[in-house]
Amino acid sequence: MFEKTFHFCPVGLAHVSVDGSFIRVNKRLCDFLGYSDEELTTLTFQELTAPDYLDEDLSYLERLMAGDIDDYAIEKRYVRRDGEQVWAKLTVSLVRDQRGNPDYFISIVEDIDEKKRIQSELFQVDALFSKIVSAFSDRTFIWVATPDLSKLQYVNDGYSNIFGRNEYELYCNPMSFIDHVHEDDKARVLKLFSQRPLQNWDIQYRI
């Protein structure tokens, strides 16, 4: 049962010696790093860690061996066989022998490369959005909400400048701006916002 669990686990697993050599690895880790199990067991994790992340990893290992911590988890980049650097979440614990001396490490390696790529793309989109918004006058009200209008995701200073209200109330209830729309225009505005699915529109109203 243990053998099947080890080799068919959906995340990378490895037993690593105290000097960093791979003792035992599962298929998931081999696939992630692009090596066969025979090849991996001739290498060390130091050789496969991107240089910028090695010092942090080694620092945690020292604390682990000293007994200062029971385990640790970090996000780091590994270098695959083809030279590509890939992101992973590494969780490490230490197994000690009967005398209490460090015996070997248990490493869990979770592929988060796609997650990191998406985060990077979202960061770039956010940066572009901020640049676009900053080009508008603070007398322009810009807001972004979920399609069902249940949650506000962004509002600029234009809301407080135009409506004279705190932005916090809009985060609590994105539709609260309706309370400040002129009574004679409120029905028209509500009708547009009640459409499903929401569409683009151009409307003028008083506040």
Image (cartoon, rainbow, N blue to C red):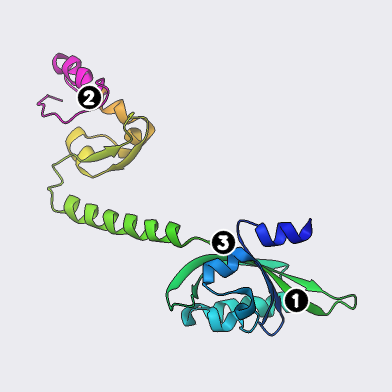
**Residue contact at pointers 2 and 1, CB within 8 angstroms:** no
Mark 2 or mark 3: name the one nearer the start of the chain.
3
Using a 10 Å C-alpha cutoff, classify the residue at mark 3 as few (fewer than 14 neighbours), some (14 to 19) or many (20 or more).
some
Q: Is residue 40 in view from this perspective?
A: yes
Q: Quadrant of residue 170?
A: top left
| Residue assigned mark 3 | 110
Identify the image quadrant of the N terminus: bottom right
Q: Please, is residue 94 above or below residue 39 in the view?
A: above
In this picture, residue 196 sits left or right of residue 48: left
Amino acid type, label 3: Glu
What residue is at 19 percent from the left and 50 percent from the top?
133
Q: Do the residues labelled 1 and 3 touch (CB within 8 Å)?
A: no
Q: In this view, does 34 lie to the left or right of 141?
A: right
The span shown in magenta is: 179-207
Look at mark 1 in the image and give the residue it sits on.
Answer: 104
Q: In which quarter of the image is residue 174?
A: top left
Which tag is nearer the camera, tag 2 or tag 1?
1
Number of other residues with Cα within 10 Å of mark 2, as a class: few under 14, some 14 to 19, many 20 or more: few
* Residue visible at 31% across and 32% down in the picture: 147
Check disc 2 and report its element: helix, strand or loop: helix
Q: Which mark is residue 180?
A: 2
- Marks 1/3: CA distance? 19 Å
Residue at 19 percent of width and 17 percent of height: 186
**Residue 140: x %, y % from top left:** 14, 41
- Asked if the stretch drawn in magenta spans residue 203, the answer is yes
Vertical arrangement, residue 7 with respect to residue 64, above or below? above
* Residue 34 appears left or right of 139: right
